[in-house]
Amino acid sequence: MTDHPETEVPMAAPDERPRWLDSKANVTKVAWALYIVCAIAVLFDFVIHRHGDTGFDETFGFYAAYGFVGSVLLVLVARHILRRIVMRPEDYYDD
Amino acid sequence: MIDFPPGLLLILGALPVPFLRGWLRGIWMLALPVAAFALLYSLPDGNHFQIAAFGQELELLRVDALSRVFGYVFIIAIFLGVIYSLHVRAVEEHVSGLIYAGAAIGAVFVGDLVSLFVYWELTAIASVFLILARRTPEALAASMRYLIIQVGSGVLLLAGLIVRWHETGSIEFGHIGIDGAGGVLILLAFGIKAAFPLLHNWLQDAYPQATPTGTVLLSAFTTKLAIYALARGYAGTEELIWIGVTMTAFPIFFAVIENDLRKVLAYSLNNQLGFMVVGVGIGTELALNGAAAHAFTHIIYKSLLFMSMGAVLHRVGTTLATELGGLYKTMPFTTVFCIIGGASISAFPLFSGFVSKSMILSAAAHEGYYFTWLVLLFASAGVFHHSGIKIPFFAFFAHDSGKRPKEAPLNMLIAMGLASILCIGIGVWPSALYAILPFEVDFVPYTDSHVLSQVQLLFFSALAFTVLMRTGLYPPELRCTNLDTDWLYRRVGRAVLRNITKTAGAIQARFYGAVNRRGQRFLVQLYRHHGPHGVLARTWPTGSMVLWVALLLFAYLFLYFIDIF
Amino acid sequence: MLAQHLPALQVVIPLLAAPLCALFRRGFIGWLIAVAANWLAFAASIGLLIRVLNEGVISYAMGGWAPPIGIEYRVDLINVFVLLVVSGVGAVIIPFARTGTAARFNDTDQAWFYTMYLLALTGLLGVTITGDAFNIFVFLEISSLASYVMIAMGRDRRALTAAYQYLIMGTVGATFIVIGIGLLWAMTGTLNLADLAQRIPEINDTRPVLAALAFLTVGISLKLALFPLHLWLPNAYAYAPAVTSAFLAGTATKVAIYLFLRFFYTVFGGGGFFSSTPLPEMFLVLSIVAMFAASTVALFQDDVKRMFAYSSVAQIGFITLGISFVTEAGLTAAMTHLFNHAIMKAGIFMLLGGVMFRLASVKLEDMAGIGRKMPFTMGGIVILGLGLIGTPGTSGFISKWWIVLAALEKDQWWLVALILVASLITMLYVGRIVEVAYFREPSAKAASVREAPLAMLIPAYVLVAATIYFGLDTNWSVGLAQQAAADLLAGLY
């Protein structure tokens, strides 16, 4: 899966100036921004009345909860169940 | 107005390409899709081009609303693909790309199954060169597996169309349905190309092996041609809903644990196809509109995503997540384009995926398929998770790999830029897309309710990713091979075959050994007594031939005589 | 006047031209004579076709002696179809022959080669046109002996053994045929096929006639290389000079198939008798085994000529499969494939001749990367290979289409599946060549080669073009085959 690119890939210079995202604190700031946006998004449920086709999706916070739980389940199942079944060494098919 | 099939225009236009050099070649290749677009635009609905062959009337240019949508987007895709690959010098890639696209476009406009079959096989044969052109041993092996499966699909289609012709006396490519054996065979053929569950693995096997530019084209045509064919032949076939639902759900689990980012995209491509298959299965006007619209937007944003990963592959030489990270520092444009693609596939409001995917979800809910709707919703959250977040995150951010590659070449950036404009343009002004859909659209994507629901779903999916990342629960990227159904033919099948040939070889050797020993002894005896022909027994092949002759003669005598007793 | 004697001219022209070549002992003159004779023979075949289409069956009394005492030449749709294939394929091959033969043989040998070629052509045309059973044997021997020499002239020393085997097996086959004919003669007192066709059906359940049938079956099976009697074919095709391989692959087995049809359908009385014997089942089984066994062997060959030789055995399986159905569709499929396969295989062997000419090898490993060096040669092989697979747009597709239709008509679903799988195997071995020729780095040998000379390419491309043409316009190939099939089933002669 590894090709030789047309030239060697340049590597970072030792004296490279760190970027804003390189700081752990700033990454935490981004995370907090996301938490706040999420909170606002849920609170909007009080302002806008969502009309669903199914009935149950009009429940407060339905999409938020479904999105969160669904994603967590997806990752955990993939990590703990699927990987256990299908993961093999990288050179599995080479012989 | 000229009545000429646009697909054929591209195929014929590809032929002079090897004889052109430099900028002349570039201009010629760019002019082809432009001409095809103009041609298609000028054609009114109706049947325009018939030829008689194989004793049948073949319909090569049936223009109607459904074929037109797919025709337009295929032409857009090849146009973007040509720009994206302008820097490539290998001529076979250009030629096969154009022929491949031409075959797919041609297939969209045929009105009968025989012509469909011809183009169907041509897409298989032309596209395999896009994988072979990578020129690695893995690519060679994968391309052969790909070719066998693709041609197998064609063979099934051929078998199905013959059976159907036998059953109905018609080779017309209209609604087919699964009432007859022919219909089932044809569905199977379409299903292979559409990567139905269990028939899907050629896609994840082959696409990541193609060249950076090749995968962009591959992702656009083969599977969407299958979606078109399904929409044409099997609209409203309820079984497709279940198939589609499965397709949306299971690939995303594989996508989460996959390390090769282009393979992640291949899995998410599979998942997106599921949405379209569900749309075809529901079969209402809204659902079919949704399937067509989603195919349209999907081709563009998926190309964009594969282009961004192709740029990474081109510059870094790998798309393994474990080898990447921090590339945003030197590839800022590619990063932005990749995020736009990610936002589109995740169906963020104001991006193209939103205006098409919501049609399918609404159609499912309208028709009361609540379970289906729930799975699709789950899959929507999941696709954001791995295509919207994982791809850009691991390639461009995440742990800094220290690699500082150059920004992508200009032509790649232009192609990605154009694709991004289309993604946002369609997302902001969906009415242009809605105007060319097969049926009248009275669907409004941008309502408070829709937008809010989608925003909540996606942000909380992102929240889940963040929380899992920051708590260390997210699976670390590992260099590994994940088994899929290809295990059946790459491991089990090969082992079985090896055993069979070994055993068969041994049996055969023993059998022939025995026959030859006996035969030779017999002949030696025979000819020793008959003097001058002794020479015959000496070279055993001749001897064994004569033995066979004798055996057969006795067999025939016996068989004929037994009849009259 | 001339038209009146066309049946005789068909055979006499190449027959007289043959010693002429030997007389001049000049390669170029010999070649000119061979070209002229072959083209005239082809013209005669076309003339015969026109006459048959206009006036029906032609009966021509050789030397003015009325049949059944004299030898009768009898031309109907079935054999005029085969005559066209034989003289047509020859007419394309013979211009091609010049370059290769001139480069390898001295003048005398060249003249000798053309003599043998013309004799082989005479023999094959004679077998096809004659209406006399013993005459069939004579012409068979002429063609076998001439082909024997043509094979032995191959540059590989194994050509000698191959030719020897070919001779032995050919002789065994011919002997069986003559025994069969002798038995028929003993029972009926006539050697005239039309007469036989009248008398045999009344006595076709007697033991001598059945014994004759068995001898004829085996003899002809040998000649047409039906599995498992194909063993002589691969070596003969592989080690012979390109001209010989192309000519034999395109004509010799095809004439044997004609003989089979003539004896079993015409002489023994229409399709009814044929299907009352166990022969169709035998043929069905052997054809399927041939399709698979030979294709699989082909898949593992490293010598490309041998690969296509085994492919011939498999393709003959497709033809005999069609025959075994004993239906109009099946026979149409068989006749169509007879026609199409002759064109494709002759073309492939000619192009391989071009490869041999430049590369001095047709080993797969030596052909690595040759696709860029010899684009037209390899391009032609790929197109013809696609034809063998049965790709739409080539004549091979038409053949497959009809065979599948014939199988469907009998409701043999499993057969359809087998036919399609066999096509997949064909795809694999053609794919192997494509992969080696286009996607490998050029081998040491291939690095310095050039495109084959035009004198070789142009004739080969006539056949490439024909393969595509007959894939699109089927009026001639299928149209004639269909009529011929109907005549065969009805036992018309």
Image (cartoon, coloured by chain):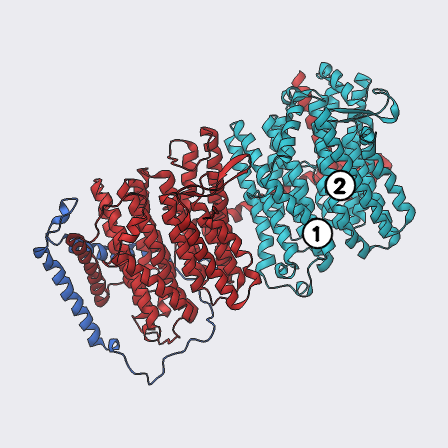
- The disc numbered 1 marks a residue on which chain? C
Q: Is residue B429 above or below residue B440?
A: below
- The disc numbered 2 marks a residue on which chain? B
Q: Determine if residue C222 is in view.
A: no
Residue B253 lies, in percent from the top left, at 30, 54
Residue for badge 1: C458
Residue B499 lies, in percent from the top left, at 52, 47
Q: Color used for chain C?
A: cyan
- Residue sitting at x 78%, y 32%: C127
Q: Color used for chain B?
A: red
Left or right placement of residue A21 versus residue C16 in this view: left
Q: Residues within 10 Å of mark 1 (few under 14, many from 20)?
A: some
Quarter assignment of residue B352: bottom left
- Residue sitting at x 35%, y 57%: B300
Left or right placement of residue B359 versus residue B261 in this view: left
Q: Determine if residue C411 is in view.
A: yes
Residue C49 lies, in percent from the top left, at 72, 31
Residue for badge 2: B542
Quarter assignment of residue C106: bottom right
Left or right placement of residue A22 versus residue B218 in this view: left
Task: State the separation of the CA atoms marked 1 and 2.
Answer: 38 Å
> What amino acid type should be assigned to the residue bearing mark 2?
Thr
Could you say which chain is coloured blue in the image?
A
Residue C67 lies, in percent from the top left, at 83, 20
As helix, strand or loop, the secondary structure at mark 1 comes to helix
Q: Work out which residue is located at the far left of the displayed protein and give it.
A: A46
Badge 1 and badge 2 both on one subunit:
no
> What amino acid type should be assigned to the residue bearing mark 1?
Ile
As helix, strand or loop, the secondary structure at mark 2 comes to helix
Residue A25 numbered mark, or none: none
